[in-house]
Image (cartoon, coloured by chain):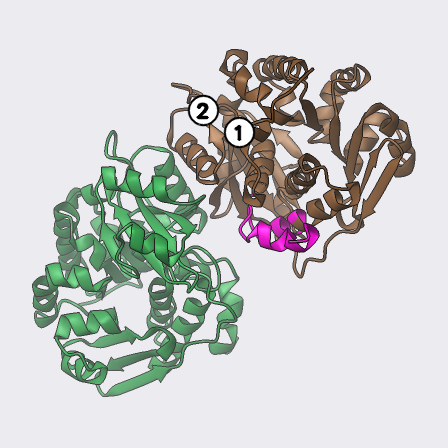
Chain colours: A brown, B green
């Protein structure tokens, strides 16, 4: 199969979410019965109740795959995003922020209720984030909102596991995988959360077994949930033979990647003060994919991921603030 | 006249605004023809055009007087806010943030258009902020939205000059001044901006001449605009005899206060890295008023203002992030 050079480095399908972030204490987490460090889906009444219990907040565009694209675009990659907002003010905020980052975004806003998705994030003094997501319009991304030409014209299709929960986007993502593979493109997938794996692990394992996933991102907890192996290295050994490129992050313990016989490890980049870990995995994926689409060595891809993750956890919010190109220049020999 | 102890330390009337903040370069300021360092009122089409030209942003509740109350409440003062939002998502954000800060806020949201006010803030690498305000619903605060009992039950009524521009809130503020004075309370006023003084200086001078203003806040540029004196000390000398308490900030040069024969000066508190000066004056006023309602010495009031201003310019946004009570404890002998 002959392929022209793709127009985009990465096209991603993900939740179109605005993060609502506030500092919180550990006793708030306990009092509100939140799952510390995880992502919990909440309905609108619960979202209102949690918002009312939250301190003064700030709103910053988020969404796992969208954060990854923001990082990729900041590094200089060509990107496109597919996701569903409502035609409301938070939808405008999301669309503005992603386009202002230089990312193509053409999914039409959805009229009426529900509102644009938001994620209520309680950030504890240890930098951990506890996320409570009201999916709103995001869960109604229809398969016919996909632009097949964009998907066929991107080197990598990147999908977030979070979006596997709602039915319409799941169908859309399955169609996108078929479109990408028919065009000879790579499919990357991030497992997102252990609870998502608890709900959809069989689907994910079937996709992997069918060879539909070229690049898989996970953290160590997701690796354990997917493989059933509590031991990290046993989990890597079990999964790596089934995925062309496997990338597993371990927080402060660094990250590992395996691609066939090629293995690499990177230590976590030092951070003076961890403010908010929201988006650490998303930005790690951004750095890694940036190296991957440039065919850089596996160890360099990991190092790029580590630098981007370190930037994001040094401030509030999951979109980059510093000049990522300057931060990674030494890794690219520039 | 006998007065009971007031229920609130400060009640403020101000613009109910959400700040939309993004980093910008000086050439963006020039290219977009913005008035660097100032506040410009913009209509909705201009607001849309500027937003489209802005980088990825974050939304944080703002509004000058509301920022001051957020600081006062964080210090432990009892506060109430009066201001007009629309019944939209940004209105919810504003109302949430002010109430979550422990501030009473009962002004009903206004149905329909225009939307909640927003201020598009371009923050340049020198930490300067250039503000472009779409007043939206904020300019329709009606006089009958005032709760006279709340105004009569606050030690200080605090008014922002920005809100003198639109007609309805101006009328509301005039009525509030009369209510406060009839109840034997103090009236504090912040001049907000030299351009506001260019438009309404005659009103402000008339209020001062009539003895309606007990505490006046200005920066050195506003002092010059109001008095016509380019020399700072000449301006202080001209104005101080007409205002019981005059507080003038000079940025990095510190701040001065005059109350009758009592004069005081405070140096600017050191800040490792000035990130964003949005809200510096608002938080200075918060610290000063906190000391004033506790009848602390003039120099201590200024020192409280300096500490609060230093906190706010060390991060993005005009609402406090650090524990202000801890930061000022040494000034209160706690």
Report the residue marked by disc 1.
A80
Query: Was residue A320 drawn as part of the magenta stretch in this picture?
Result: yes
Where residue B210 sits in the image (x, y, percent)?
Answer: 8, 69
Residue A113, disc: none
Closest to the observer: A230 or B305? A230
Instruction: Quadrant for residue A176, please give it.
Output: top right
Residue at 69% across / 46% down in the picture?
A304
Res B95 visible:
yes
Residue beneath disc 2: A106
Q: Residue at x 69, y 27 (%)?
A: A188
Q: Quadrant of the N terminus of chain A?
A: top right
Q: Residue A51, image x and y in percent?
A: 50, 38
Q: Nearer the viewer, residue A75 or B259?
A: A75
SS at mark 1 in the image: strand
Bounds of the magenta segment: A308-334
Using the rendered image of the protein, determine whether residue A36 is visible from the camera's viewpoint: no
Residue B292 or residue B165, whichever sits in front: B165
Q: Contact, CB < 8 Å: mark 1 with mark 2?
A: yes
Mark 2 closeness class: few <14, some 14–19, many ≥20 residues within 10 Å? some
């Amino acid at each position: 199969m002959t392929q022209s050079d793709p127009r985009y480095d990465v096209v991603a399908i993900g939740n179109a979410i605005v993060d609502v972030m506030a500092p919180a204490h550990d006793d708030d987490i306990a009092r509100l019965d939140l799952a510390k460090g995880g992502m919990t889906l909440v309905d609108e009444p619960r979202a209102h109740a949690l918002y009312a219990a939250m301190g003064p907040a700030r709103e910053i565009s988020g969404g796992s795959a969208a954060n990854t694209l923001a990082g990729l675009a900041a590094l200089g990659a060509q990107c496109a995003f597919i996701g569903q907002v409502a035609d409301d003010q938070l939808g405008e905020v999301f669309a503005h922020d992603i386009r202002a980052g230089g990312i193509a975004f053409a999914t039409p806003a959805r009229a009426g209720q529900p509102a644009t998705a938001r994620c209520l994030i309680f950030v504890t003094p240890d930098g951990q984030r506890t996320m409570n997501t009201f999916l709103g319009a995001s869960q109604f991304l229809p398969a016919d909102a996909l632009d097949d030409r964009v998907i066929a014209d991107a080197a990598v299709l990147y999908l977030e596991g979070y979006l596997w929960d709602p039915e319409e986007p799941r169908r859309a993502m399955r169609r996108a995988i078929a479109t990408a593979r028919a065009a000879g493109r790579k499919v990357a997938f991030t497992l997102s959360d252990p609870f998502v794996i608890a709900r959809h692990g069989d689907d994910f394992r079937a996709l992997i077994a069918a060879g539909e996933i070229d690049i898989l991102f996970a953290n160590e907890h997701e690796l354990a949930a997917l493989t059933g192996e509590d031991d990290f290295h046993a989990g890597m050994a079990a999964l790596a033979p089934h995925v062309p490129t496997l990338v597993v992050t371990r927080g402060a313990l660094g990250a590992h990647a395996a691609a066939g016989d090629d293995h690499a490890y990177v230590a976590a980049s030092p951070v003076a003060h961890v403010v908010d870990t929201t988006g650490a995995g998303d930005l790690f994926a951004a750095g890694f994919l940036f190296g991957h689409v440039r065919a850089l060595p596996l160890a360099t891809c990991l190092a790029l991921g580590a630098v981007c993750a370190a930037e994001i956890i040094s401030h509030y919010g999951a979109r980059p603030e510093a000049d990522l190109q300057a931060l990674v220049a030494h890794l690219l020999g520039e």
